[in-house]
Image: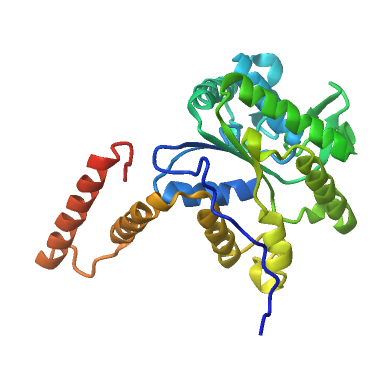
Amino acid sequence: MLLQTHIPFQKETHNPIGYDSNIMLLGSCFSEHMGHKLAYYKFSVFQNPFGILFHPKAIENILLKAINQEKYDARDVFFQNERWHCFEAHSELSHSDKETVLNNLNAAITATHIQLQKATHVIITLGTAWTYRHIETDTIVANCHKVPQKKFLKELLSSSEVSASIENSITLLKSINPAITILLTVSPVRHLKDGFMENQRSKAHLLAGIHELVETRHQIHYFPSYELMMDELRDYRFYTTDMIHPNAVAVNYIWEKFQYTWISSQSEPVMEEVASIQRGLAHKAFNPASKQHQEFLLKLQLKIEQLQQEFPHINF
């Protein structure tokens, strides 16, 4: 008896992710889940240098600035609730010291520019098509930083605006790195603060905009994170207690589909070895000073050194 509908997947054979890949992840909080999985298995990962970015305009803006190596100055930050912020970055880059914020922003610009040049894959996860336009500056922001809502206009990007913004991002990526593989996905996180119907409209606009551009011949792909959550995992037991975010079971399920599709077959034995080492490092010894535990640590270190001989960039 079949109790689920299943999305068909095929193994990517043209340019799969391996231990020689450099992976950049940009976008919503779900990209953090996939990034953490890749990092756990010790792939080369560069993730959300400007923090979580929810909509395509925010990602387009950051890519433009990074590729042009534009520097931030005092005009780009503001003081709110005893901290300095930038409308183009997540609050994790905010700080009580103005110079620290500017230094962090400019360090992120430099690091992103460098990583874009050597990235083999960029994974962009879009969370919403809703945006907030700062009335005073007439600019769409990446994060409102709890500035009063009356200072913004809430706007929904049309599917054509979503498509145009993603196309701009693709053009920017290809201009600095023509061989890069671009993987687009829609976050399964439900943005219910916007409203139930508004969330569905938003996701629909993202999906319609993305699929105008997917073209495997040009290394622009789509991975169905959203569809996996909505169709294969359509049950509240796969959500956290807020009933909005996918829980660990759902994240692992989607990761397994991603691994099957995008991780090279040659990398899977290495992943198993890395996972074995990770479990060893996480092991809590009952008696750390015992001879048995010391022998265990010695064997673990030997496994690490043997792996690093083949993959020097792997660091535990």
User: Of residues 155 and 147, which is closer to you in this image?
Assistant: 155
User: Of residues 187 and 266, which is closer to you in this image?
Assistant: 266
**Relative height, residue 112 to residue 289 (above, below):** above
Q: Name which residue lies at 81% across and 53% down.
A: 193
Kindly tell me whether residue 307 is visible in this rendering: yes
Q: Name which residue lies at 39% across and 46% down.
A: 42
Q: Is residue 229 left or right of residue 261?
A: right
Q: Is residue 148 left or right of residue 285?
A: right
Q: How is the image coloured?
A: rainbow
**Relative height, residue 188 to residue 47 (above, below):** below
- Look at the image and tell me in which quarter the N terminus lies: bottom right
User: Of residues 149 and 305, which is closer to you in this image?
Assistant: 305
Percent from the top left, x then y, of residue 21?
Answer: 44, 37
Percent from the top left, x then y, of residue 45?
Answer: 47, 39
Query: What is the quadrant of residue 121 in the picture?
Result: top right
Q: In this view, does 164 lie to the left or right of 58?
A: right
Query: What is the quadrant of residue 169 in the picture?
Result: top right
Q: In this view, does 36 lie to the left or right of 59?
A: left
Q: Name which residue lies at 62% across and 14% down.
A: 68
Percent from the top left, x then y, of residue 139?
Answer: 82, 24
